[in-house]
Image: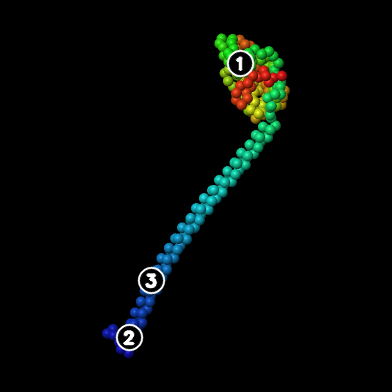
Amino acid sequence: MRKNSRGTPLLLRKYYGVMIVGFVLFLGVMAYYSVKFKEKRELAKQEVELEDSVGAANSATEATTEVTSTEEATETTTEEAAQTIGQQISYDGKTKLSWPITGNVILPYSTDETVYFETLDQYRTNPGILIEAKEGASVKAVKQAEVTEVRNSSEYGQTVVMDLGSGYTAMYGQMKDLTVKAGDTVEKGQVIGKVAAPTSYYTLEGTNLYFQMEKDKKSVDPSKYLE
């Protein structure tokens, strides 16, 4: 066998050369597939993250939908309850109402003409009536109604507002020792409180109950509805 100057057979040199080339090609292929694998893995990670984001968004949407559905159901229930109360409490505007207290009318209802207010020493319109009464006398509901508001004012003192049904409301002013609160349903003749001392607007008129009625938020003459 012919040898080179260093004594290495020529065939062996060729063999090693082929091995080196093959090994280099192998490394190249591995590097290529390694890059492709990394790219695929990164792509897969991005897809998973995207799916997670979409899933989270869907979950949030579903949760919001559930909350909205719950709120709508609650609103529906509230509306149904209000409708039920509205169906139970009604007023035809013709049936006479009982007087909230027995006594003479000190100041009549008058919105077209002014009447004289002695304490204020002036003429004014009067959207309600003042009924003479003793302090501490019981005040009664004029009919079945729902208490919608309890408030205080400088003119009428402690005041109770009731929904009589069908757009009619009643307001009782200058009261104390209330036995009702907003949201209560009262029956005709039920005691709702007592007459208080008159406010500074009515000291000369004497102790009285202020009573006012409205139809669709417009005042009406209570005397036409009381029996």
In three-dimensional space, the C-alpha distance between marks 1 and 2, rounded to whole angstroms, equals 134 Å
For label 3, count other residues whose C-alpha is less than 10 Å away and answer few (under 14), some (14-19) or many (20+). few
Numbered disc in front, either 2 or 3: 3
Residue placed furthest toward the left: 5
- Which image quarter: residue 95? top right
Q: Can residue 52 be seen in this view?
A: yes
Q: Which mark is residue 9?
A: 2
Residue under numbered circle 1: 110
**Mark 2 crowdedness (10 Å alpha carbons): few <14, some 14-19, many ≥20:** some
Q: Position of residue 186 (x, y in %)?
A: 69, 27
Please give the name of the residue rendered at 70% of the width and 24% of the height, measured from the top-left corner: 94
Identify the image quadrant of residue 211. Answer: top right
**Could you say where residue 216 lies in the image, as x and y percent from the top left?**
61, 26
Secondary element under disc 1, as helix, strand or loop, is: strand
Residue under numbered circle 3: 28
The first of marks 3 and 1 along the sequence is: 3
